[in-house]
Structures are given as structure tokens and as C-alpha cells.
């Protein structure tokens, strides 16, 4: 069964509750959540004048094709109240597909692996907790090595909330 890695994040409202609700909805509508990273608090990336995010990576076993995974996670975001008002803006929940097995695909709606993951410490740190030796299918480097080489210096801390 395909293994999908999803990044959950949000910086509005009860951030932890939104992550937990998204986790439950993913387990119900996308596939079995096999493992989950710790929750991390991270400074905002891209548009920095906003509250800190909580982020978490989930390893999900799914029978769904990548396009249907995207459709389902977008529906979960909407159901939880996500509004796409501005690029990199504040949000209650964001769910990104990081990897779908070792698939490489590029469509108008979906890029797998996620094209920015190797540049984002808030993605690589929780991902390295679950799959440090997994190799990026394009960059041909392990997640652990990508984290060591990551140019992002934003603060990422385990959330003790």
C-alpha cells in the first residue's frame, strides 16, 4: 500500500486542536495514519508578520491515487475552515503532500515531491523524525542530509503546549 507523507500546519485559533482534527479526518478519509512526528512550533516562513505555526508530519498508508489524496486533504482544509486569502498567509490548517512513495509527478495542481520541502526546516525536522534515511527521489539525498544542508535558519522547537 502506498505511503504518503503529509505536513500539517496552522497558526490561527486553537492550533493544536486543528492539527488533531485534521489528523482524525485524514485517518478517516485518506488512509491509516501509521506514524506521526512530534508537534513543532515554528516561526512563520515566507510572510513573517504573523503568529507562529504548529507543524506536524504524518505517515499515511493509503489506497488513494495522489490526485484523490490532494482532493481529500483540500476538502478537509475547507471543512476545518481554511480560507485562502493570501499566499503564505495565516490559516487554521494547511495540509501539504510531501511524498507519495518515491513517485515524481508534476501537474498543474500537484507536484510530488513537494517542490519546497528541502528549503524548509519546519518540514524537514519533523519529517526526519519519521524517515531520516528516506531518499528524495529527485535530489538523491536523504532527509537527514537535506536537513543538515537546509539554508532555512528559522526557529523550530518541539511544542510543549
Image (tube, rainbow, N blue to C red):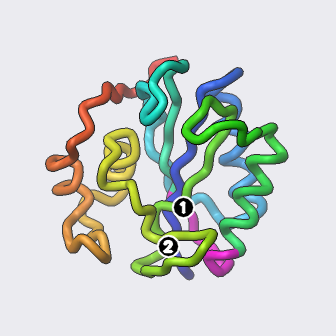
Please state the extent of the stretch shown in magenta in the rendering: 59-67
Q: Does 133 sit left or right of 18 as displayed?
A: left
Name the quadrant containing residue 68.
Answer: bottom right
In the figure, 151 relative to 73: above or below? above
The CA distance from mark 2 to mark 1 is: 7 Å
Front position in the image: 85 or 127 = 85
Front position in the image: 72 or 154 = 154
Q: Does 125 sit left or right of 103 as displayed?
A: left
Residues at marks 2 and 1 touching, judged by CB atoms closer than 8 Å: yes
In the image, which disc is placed on residue 27?
none
Q: Secondary structure at mark 2?
A: strand
- For label 1, the residue is 97
Q: Does 137 sit left or right of 89 as displayed?
A: left
Q: Could you tell me which residue is drawn at 15 percent across and 49 percent down? A: 149
Expressed as whole percent of the image width and height from the top left, the position of residue 69 reads: 67, 69
In the figure, 138 relative to 44: above or below? below
Expressed as whole percent of the image width and height from the top left, the position of residue 140 reads: 21, 74
Question: In the displayed image of the protein, which residue is found farthest to the right?
Answer: 79
Q: Secondary structure at mark 1?
A: strand
Q: Could you tell me which residue is drawn at 79 percent across and 40 percent down? A: 80
138 magenta-colored: no
Expressed as whole percent of the image width and height from the top left, the position of residue 54 reads: 52, 30
Front position in the image: 83 or 131 = 83
Expressed as whole percent of the image width and height from the top left, the position of residue 66 reads: 61, 76
Count of numbered circles on the image: 2
Q: Could you tell me which residue is drawn at 56 percent across and 82 percent down? A: 1
The residue carrying pointer 2 sits among few (fewer than 14), some (14 to 19) or many (20 or more) residues within 10 Å by Cα, namely many
In the figure, 161 relative to 85: above or below? above
Front position in the image: 143 or 81 = 81
Q: Could you tell me which residue is drawn at 68 percent across and 78 percent down? A: 64
- For label 2, the residue is 100
Amino acid at each position: 500500500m502506498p505511503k504518503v507523507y503529509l505536513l500539517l500546519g496552522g497558526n490561527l485559533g486553537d492550533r493544536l486542536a486543528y492539527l488533531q482534527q485534521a489528523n482524525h479526518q485524514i485517518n478517516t478519509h485518506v488512509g491509516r495514519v501509521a506514524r506521526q512526528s512530534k508537534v513543532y512550533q515554528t516561526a512563520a516562513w515566507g510572510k513573517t508578520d504573523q503568529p507562529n505555526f504548529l507543524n506536524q508530519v504524518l505517515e499515511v498508508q493509503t489506497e488513494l491515487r495522489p490526485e484523490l489524496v490532494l482532493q481529500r486533504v483540500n476538502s478537509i482544509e475547507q471543512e476545518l475552515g481554511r480560507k485562502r486569502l493570501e499566499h503564505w498567509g495565516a490559516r487554521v490548517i494547511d495540509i501539504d503532500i510531501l511524498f507519495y512513495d518515491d513517485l515524481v509527478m508534476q501537474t498543474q495542481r500537484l507536484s510530488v515531491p513537494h517542490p519546497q520541502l528541502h528549503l524548509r526546516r519546519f518540514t524537514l525536522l519533523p519529517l526526519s523524525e519519521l524517515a531520516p534515511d528516506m531518499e528524495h527521489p529527485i535530489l538523491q539525498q536523504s532527509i537527514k542530509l537535506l536537513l543538515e544542508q537546509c539554508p532555512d535558519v528559522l526557529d523550530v522547537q518541539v511544542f510543549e503546549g
